[in-house]
């Protein structure tokens, strides 16, 4: 049976969140003066109440030597708190954690570095903190410098380093100084693409040497590639522990349930969507997957319903509808419209009705999308164009069935395509 290097039992962490009694965030001077006698007598005090926030609750884990545990979950799920407890940065409120061996931690950029010391001095300081001798540190010194790429600035105080330089040196120290357990918290997101590839390759190599890694990352492709096991945290509790692919599916399902409530309709902007006696009254979006209404996902069906009403001044003119999808940076990704672009005309509007748009395969990569809606006259003349009426999240999906989920960091759209290779040996 494999030896357990990390074991947690009933691990819980509570933070005390202070707030004012009766929900008042601030008191006026008059209220302070009125309450002063009572407060001086320690009576009728408008004291702050304390709420309990459980960052972790009853987490049981057992990690064996040579395992790579990928920990995933939404922001605030308790992932960083778990690593802080394992690295002894903070102590649990209840339960306990046991770790066998030297621990190297990368919880934030420059962890364990002194800003006034040079890169060279911090390498020896970090090694000493890991319990290594000066001879052991010297044996790996050249590898650390070469991997980090900061040789030119090795004798410069680290306070003058950029965040990327800090990261490269910190990771190199943790990776090469032979800590038996390596704890990494999303820090690799700071580095450039080339360095991230180097780090992923190095972690592959570390895992093959029998050392143990606990990795937190929002890069699900990296979690699936590197991890031998996956743990999913949700609201401080362990929701899943097992193989990475199943863990990722559990995480995506949890995201889907929460994101279904994150479609935002801007009511004030919606009110301004009117012109010449016609107005938009409601906008609904969704995704039709196997007959079940769900939130939008890359490559799945997308539904947009725009309801309208007309008043007595309406003369029965034909209208058009335009929808512009944008990224959070405002980049126009896709424009869909009734006449003239699509060739579809609404014809004369009724007293009330709904215009339905169906996209069989949503081409957007995962991320937040803004939706502009406009009303047009025949001839494509806008009578009302309101930006960002709707915002919604497109969820991750393995569009290419390659085991890799695609987000907006890898482009804004996806499309089906084919590759060919003709060999001429």
Image (tube, rainbow, N blue to C red):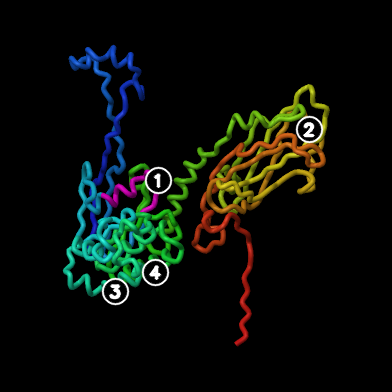
Determine whether 29 is above or below 392 in the image: above
Q: How many numbered marks, from 0 up?
A: 4
| Residue at which label 3 appears | 142
| Residue at which label 1 appears | 75
Magenta stretch? 71-84
Where is residue 252 drawn, in percent x and y? 47, 50
For marks 4 and 3, the one nearer the N-term is 3
Where is residue 389 drawn, in percent x and y? 61, 37
| Residue at which label 2 appears | 349
Residue at the outermost bottom position:
425
* Residue 40 vs residue 319, the one in the foreground: 40
Q: Quadrant of residue 353?
A: top right
Determine whether 24 is above or below 170 in the image: above
Q: Residue at x 36, y 25 (%)?
A: 25
For marks 4 and 2, the one nearer the N-term is 4
Q: Tell me the SS state at disc 4.
A: helix
Q: Quadrant of the C terminus?
A: bottom right
Q: Residue at x 33, y 46 (%)?
A: 78
Where is residue 347 drawn, in percent x and y? 81, 37
Q: Tell me the SS state at disc 1.
A: loop
Marks 4 & 2, CB-CB < 8 Å contact: no
Q: Quadrant of residue 266?
A: top right
Q: Residue at x 27, y 38 (%)?
A: 15
Marks 4 & 3, CB-CB < 8 Å contact: no
Q: CA distance from mark 1 to mark 2?
A: 46 Å
Marks 1 & 2, CB-CB < 8 Å contact: no
Q: Tell me the SS state at disc 2.
A: loop
Query: Few, some or many C-alpha atoms within 10 Å of disc 4 (few <14, some 14-19, many ≥20)?
Result: few
Query: Few, some or many C-alpha atoms within 10 Å of disc 1 (few <14, some 14-19, many ≥20)?
Result: few
Apparent side of residue 12 relative to residue 349 in the rendered image (left or right): left
Q: Quadrant of residue 166?
A: bottom left
For marks 1 and 4, the one nearer the N-term is 1
């Amino acid at each position: 049976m494999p030896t357990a290097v990390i074991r947690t039992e009933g691990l819980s962490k509570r933070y005390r969140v202070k707030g004012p009694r009766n929900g008042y965030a601030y008191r006026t001077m008059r209220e302070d003066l009125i309450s002063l006698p009572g407060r001086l007598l320690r009576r009728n005090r408008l004291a702050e109440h304390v709420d309990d926030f459980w960052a972790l609750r009853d987490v049981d884990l057992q990690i064996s030597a040579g395992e790579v545990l990928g920990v995933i979950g939404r922001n605030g799920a308790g992932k960083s708190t778990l690593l802080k407890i394992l690295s002894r940065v903070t102590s649990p409120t209840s339960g306990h954690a046991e770790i066998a061996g030297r621990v190297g931690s990368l919880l934030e950029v420059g962890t364990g570095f002194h800003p006034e010391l040079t890169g060279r001095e911090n390498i020896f300081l970090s090694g000493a903190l890991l319990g290594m001798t000066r001879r052991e540190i010297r044996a790996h010194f050249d590898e650390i410098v070469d991997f980090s790429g900061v040789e030119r600035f090795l004798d410069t105080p680290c306070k003058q380093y950029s965040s990327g330089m800090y990261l490269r040196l910190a990771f190199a120290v943790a990776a090469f100084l032979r800590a038996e357990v390596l704890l990494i918290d999303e820090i690799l997101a700071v580095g450039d693409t080339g360095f991230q590839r180097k780090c992923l390759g190095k972690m592959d190599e570390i895992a093959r040497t029998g050392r143990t890694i606990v990795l937190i990352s929002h890069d699900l492709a990296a979690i699936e590639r590197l991890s031998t096991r996956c743990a999913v945290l949700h609201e401080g509790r362990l929701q899943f522990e097992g193989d990475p692919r199943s863990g990722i599916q559990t995480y995506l399902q949890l995201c889907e349930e929460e994101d279904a409530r994150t479609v935002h309709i801007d009511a004030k902007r919606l009110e301004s969507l009117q012109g010449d006696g016609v107005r938009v009254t409601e906008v609904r979006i969704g995704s039709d997957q196997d007959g079940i209404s769900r939130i939008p996902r890359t490559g799945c069906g997308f539904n947009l319903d725009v309801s309208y009403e007309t008043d007595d001044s309406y003369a029965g003119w034909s209208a058009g509808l335009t929808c512009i999808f944008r990224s959070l940076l405002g980049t126009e990704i896709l424009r869909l419209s009734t006449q003239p672009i699509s060739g579809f005309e609404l014809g004369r509007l009724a007293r009330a009705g709904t215009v339905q748009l169906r996209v069989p395969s949503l081409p957007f990569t995962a991320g937040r999308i803004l939706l502009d809606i406009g009303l047009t006259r025949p001839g494509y003349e806008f009578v009302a164009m309101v930006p960002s009426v709707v915002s919604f999240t497109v969820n991750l999906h393995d569009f290419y069935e390659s085991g890799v989920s695609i987000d907006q960091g890898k482009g804004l759209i996806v499309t089906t395509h084919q590759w060919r290779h003709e060999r001429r040996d």
